[in-house]
Image (cartoon, helix red, strand yellow):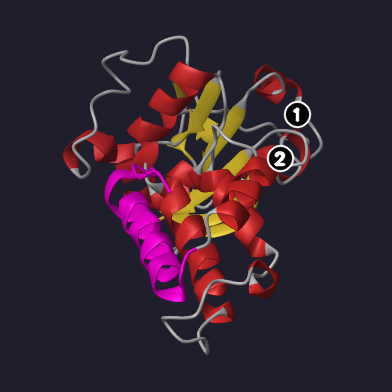
Amino acid sequence: MIYLIDDNQNSQRQNQYNINFIEDGTFNGYLTSVERIEKREKANDILHLKFLQNAKCILLHITTEDWDVEKGFLSGSTSNVRKIKEEIADFGDKIPLVLFSNNMGEPEVENPHFIRGIKKNLFYEHLKVFVEYYKNTGEIELQILAWGKNFQAKEVRNIGNIVLEAIISQKNTDKLDLKNLPKQFQEFIKLSFSNISYEVFLDDLEKNPVTISEFREKIQSIIESYLQYGENIYTW
């Protein structure tokens, strides 16, 4: 279960972000929304948060205020946020964790299990695709929250540019020398052609050499395919 911790005061999700799939139960069994968590007087009391210990992922609005049955939301009081972040999830080491808020900027992806910060509107823009991916695969892919459904495009583009940079000084008519390719080329091929091993791919490339111009075009076509479709639609 993915747990979304957000006080959602003034029904902000529905009124500002036009998000209804959470309240209408579209992802029942996969996503649970928690809007109110009571404050405990003892600073080290986390017994009321034990329900989160089996979470597949925790999505935490870092300004979610503590709740009091008589007083309602306690302005400025965020003790539960601290406990979830530091003790329950341990900054993603125990449970994958995402921190979001209006005050944050570009996504800060600390590691595959922890997004240190992401702006709230961007978080909600990508949330549905993120949960759908989890529902369909059973996997938590935090990069979807950071970069959207075409999250791999950013990685493929960065690696592809490294590969192209390594041959930038060579003439278009030269034959590609595999020895001049950087080690990142292996990762680029693994991402782009999941149905073939790198060793088989490399062997085929040696037997069917290409020019620098042809090689550049192929790499650029794959990058463009990821940017447009979120996957590689081309054969080599």
Residue nearest the observer in this picture, 154 or 68: 154
Q: Quadrant of residue 66?
A: top right
Q: Which residue is mark 1?
A: 46
Q: Secondary structure beneath disc 2?
A: helix
Label 1 with label 2: CB-CB less than 8 Å: yes
In the displayed structure image, the side of residue 167 where residue 235 appears, left or right: left
Q: Which segment is the magenta one?
A: 210-236
| Residue type beneath disc 1 | Ile
Position of the N terminus, as image quadrant, is top right
Residue name at image x 65 percent, y 48 percent: 203
Pick out the residue farthest to the front.
Answer: 207
The residue identified by callout 2 is 83
Residue 166 location (% of width, % of height): 59, 79
Of 138 and 84, the residue lying toward us: 138
Earlier residue among tags 1 and 2: 1
User: Percent x, y for residue 26?
Assistant: 31, 15
Q: Amino acid at mark 2?
A: Lys
Q: Is residue 236 visible?
A: yes
